[in-house]
Image (spheres, rainbow, N blue to C red):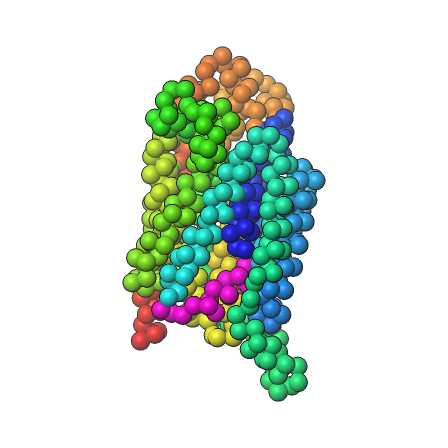
């Protein structure tokens, strides 16, 4: 069920920044970075903080029931995106989708916790994370092909995909269901007094071990969401993926439909689309996560998280320093290893420190660092890239320098300024791209984002030493 949910979710999520900033003439929303940042900010707040409450509800109501409700809500979110291709339509769809996703996660993750022990949890979370990324790998590839036909096809397809979970729910059996029902019966009869969910959640959240975890690990999520949100824009603007295709298939590219699909290529087989390049991340996790999980099983969870966060930060700094496609591939591989060391271990860590009757609650808490990091990145990532890395923004500056009136430059639709510059200057598009890249410090946004990760990695290492002393 998680794999199906991720297939649909990443089919939309990984191309959302491309859709939002694509020119209206191409079927996109034609939004500037700051507007996209507002949508991503509220998307992040909704999706990340809803599980803090719904995790506890899942423990009390039942995992199967909340998974069913979330599936209905998520279908509506995808349909809203398809029906209303405007800023507010996409905002509404994103918020509904985020609410449904926030309900979905605690029940699924708590099922993993209840079905494993400390002895096998590292491998279990690794396999789970690997399986999830099968969906995360296929979803963007479907979107890469469907969006070349029409953007709305992406949203309708994802609504259809997530509906498959209704069938899978028929086979789902909740772990410890009888124990949960017996506990609820005792609460109802008054035999057990249960504090309100808000009070219970707040009391747990105020534990110092959770507060510092949320603050420090949010740095990792800040980077991860920047990779998903900003890297597609950077690859679209500055990375010539045709070089990679020529190295792999020759000067004429490929017409093989299998390769075109698996690599997320344009339909002419000449270039890899931005989401195809980003999707190397999901492919790495899909193929190698169980190997990394086996290796990380002998490392304390906090140390693994610190090492992974450092590798992810190093990868983003590498992206900021270059735009050669094979270096981008190397950076994505490095980032993926960092993610495999960090993200699964964070769920393992939270599951291990959670009290027996509060597993879903604590797995809901695990979304808080994501919420903090994603909320900050949702705005600042788009803003920083819009200021320092956007080819559209830089093209407008050059048009002004060439003497085009400011009113005429402002009238150029978002996403079409570079093409206008090509027409005005009469120069080759690739040559102009190289000139703009050389004349501007495009990597500034990545340097700032990577610096956040380096600070977080150092903090996680210190946090690990502190928690180890507490255990002793």
Most extreme residue toward the right, as rendered? 83
Task: Relative to 250, say whether 390 is above or below.
Answer: below
Q: Position of residue 211 (x, y in %)?
A: 46, 65
Q: Is residue 471 left or right of residue 193?
A: left
Q: Position of residue 378 (x, y in %)?
A: 53, 46
Q: Which residues are magenta?
A: 105-119
What main secondary structure does the magenta stretch of the protein show?
Answer: helix
Work out which quarter of the rendered image holds the N terminus and state it. bottom right
Q: Is residue 106 magenta?
A: yes
Q: Residue at x 38, y 69 (%)?
A: 118
Q: Is residue 18 magenta?
A: no
Q: Residue at x 50, y 38 (%)?
A: 141
Q: Position of residue 354 (x, y in %)?
A: 46, 71
Count of picture labels:
0
Hey, which quadrant is residue 23 in on the image? top right
Most extreme residue toward the top, as rendered? 426
């Amino acid at each position: 069920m998680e794999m199906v949910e991720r297939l649909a979710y990443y089919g939309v999520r990984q191309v959302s920044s491309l859709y939002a900033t694509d020119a209206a003439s191409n079927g996109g929303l034609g939004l500037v970075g700051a507007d996209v940042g507002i949508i991503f900010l509220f998307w992040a707040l909704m999706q990340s903080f809803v599980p803090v409450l719904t995790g506890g509800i899942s423990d009390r109501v039942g995992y199967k029931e909340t998974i069913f409700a979330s599936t209905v809500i998520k279908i509506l979110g995808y349909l809203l995106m398809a029906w209303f291709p405007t800023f507010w339509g996409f905002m509404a769809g994103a918020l509904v989708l985020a609410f449904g996703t926030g309900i979905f996660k605690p029940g699924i993750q708590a099922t993993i916790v209840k079905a494993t022990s400390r002895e096998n949890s590292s491998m279990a979370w690794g396999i789970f994370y690997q399986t999830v990324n099968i969906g995360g790998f296929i979803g963007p590839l479907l979107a890469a092909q469907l969006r070349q036909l029409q953007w709305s096809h992406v949203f309708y397809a994802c609504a259809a995909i997530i509906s498959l979970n209704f069938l899978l729910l028929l086979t789902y059996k909740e772990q410890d269901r009888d124990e949960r029902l017996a506990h609820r019966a005792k609460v109802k009869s008054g035999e057990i007094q249960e504090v309100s969910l808000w009070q219970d959640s707040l009391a747990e959240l105020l534990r110092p071990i959770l507060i510092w975890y949320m603050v420090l690990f949010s740095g990792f999520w800040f980077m991860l969401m920047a990779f998903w949100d900003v890297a597609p824009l950077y690859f679209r603007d500055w990375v010539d993926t045709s070089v990679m295709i020529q190295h792999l298939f020759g000067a004429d590219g490929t017409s093989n439909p299998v390769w075109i699909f698996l690599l997320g290529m344009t339909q002419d087989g000449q270039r890899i689309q931005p989401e195809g390049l980003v999707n190397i991340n999901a492919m790495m996790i899909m193929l190698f996560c169980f190997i990394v999980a086996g290796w990380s099983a002998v490392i304390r969870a906090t140390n693994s998280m610190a090492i992974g966060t450092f590798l992810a930060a190093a990868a983003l700094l590498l992206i900021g320093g270059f735009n050669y496609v094979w270096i981008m591939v190397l950076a994505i591989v490095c980032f993926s290893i960092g993610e495999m060391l960090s993200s699964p271990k964070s769920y393992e860590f939270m599951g291990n420190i959670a009290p027996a009757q509060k597993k879903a609650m604590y797995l809901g808490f695990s979304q808080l660092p994501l919420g903090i990091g994603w909320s900050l990145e949702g705005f600042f990532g788009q803003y920083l890239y819009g200021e320092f890395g956007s080819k559209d923004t830089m093209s407008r500056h050059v048009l002004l320098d060439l003497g085009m009136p400011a009113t005429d430059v402002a009238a150029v639709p978002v996403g079409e300024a570079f093409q206008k510059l090509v027409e005005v200057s009469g120069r080759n598009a690739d040559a102009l791209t190289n000139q703009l890249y050389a004349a501007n410090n495009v990597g500034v946004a990545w340097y700032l984002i990577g610096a956040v990760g380096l600070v977080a990695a150092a903090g996680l290492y210190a946090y690990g030493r502190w928690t180890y002393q507490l255990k002793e």
